[in-house]
Every structure is written in structure tokens, then in C-alpha cells.
Image (cartoon, rainbow, N blue to C red):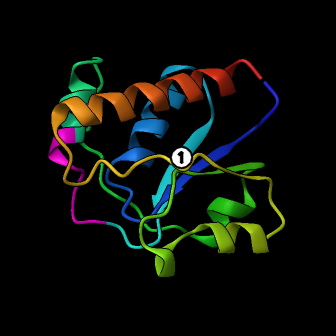
Amino acid sequence: MKYSKIVFLCVENAGRSKMAEAFGKKYGINCESAGTQPAAGINEIVKQAMNEKGITFEDEKPRMLTKDMIDSSDLVVIMGCSVEESCPAPLARSMEKKVVDWNLEDPKGKTLQEVRKIRDEIEKRVRELSFE
């Protein structure tokens, strides 16, 4: 694989980045996820959608992004920013890391059917990373 460590970032670390991290680990990628303003817990609809894929978040909690996370990675994937003032992209870019913005819809407030589409797109993109 091209990347030794990937960090998936979003604002709350309660949906998109958690799904990406879970799929990354499933496909053998050394990865972690975090947010700039972590939520209190993982989105319940996201949990339900991931359970359908055999992935549970029993012990997982949203985590705060740290400088060390970015320092130790060689690819930073921004899931998309819905809150500009909390977007992690400028921080990651300022640290001269390779940054990719997937610009995915936030699952917050979405139906299970809508979250499934986001989940499936994340899985597809993570699988592509695992083959790079």
C-alpha cells in the first residue's frame, strides 16, 4: 500500500470519519479518525447502517483531532465540511501533508436510506485506498 497511515477527519467524528476508519481497519489500512469538535457520541443512524455491514461501534467514541495524529500520518482525508469555522482542512494543509477532500454529505439528520448511500460511497472510496 502507498500510505503507511491515514487519518480520516470531519467536524464531529460521529459519522463519516468513523465509518471510514471502520472500513479502513476492515480492509487492513493503518488508520484513525478524529474531529475538530467531537460529538458526545456516534450518530445512532450511522451505528444502525454500519451494523448492517457487520461493524459495531460498541466501545468507540468521537475523538478530538491532535497535531500528533496529523504528524504521524502521510495522508489526511477530509470527509467534507459542513461547519466552515470548524473545518479541519486548513489545519491539515498548513502542516504540509497530502490532503484529499472527499466532500461527502454529513449523515447528521439523514434517514437510514440516505445514510446507507453515504456509507456505501465511503466503503467504495476506502477500498480504493486499500488498493493504491
Check the picture and name the quadrant holding the C terminus.
Answer: top right
Residue 56 seen from this side: no
Classify mark 1: helix, strand or loop. strand
Decide: is 10 above or below 111. below
Residue 100 seen from this side: yes
Residue 116: % across, % down: 29, 28
Residue 94 falls in which quadrant of the image? bottom right
- Amino acid at circle 1: Glu
Q: Which residues fall within the magenta stretch?
A: 39-45
Quick one: 31 or 44, which is closer to the camera?
44
At a point 39% along the width and 73% down the height, the residue shown is 37
Image position of 2 (left or right of 85): right
At a point 43% along the width and 33% down the height, the residue shown is 22
**Quick check: is 15 in the magenta stretch?**
no
Image position of 127 (left or right of 11): right
* Residue placed under numbered mark 1 in the picture: 32
Q: Main secondary structure of the magenta part?
A: loop
At a point 17% along the width and 33% down the height, the residue shown is 112
Residue 54 falls in which quadrant of the image? top left
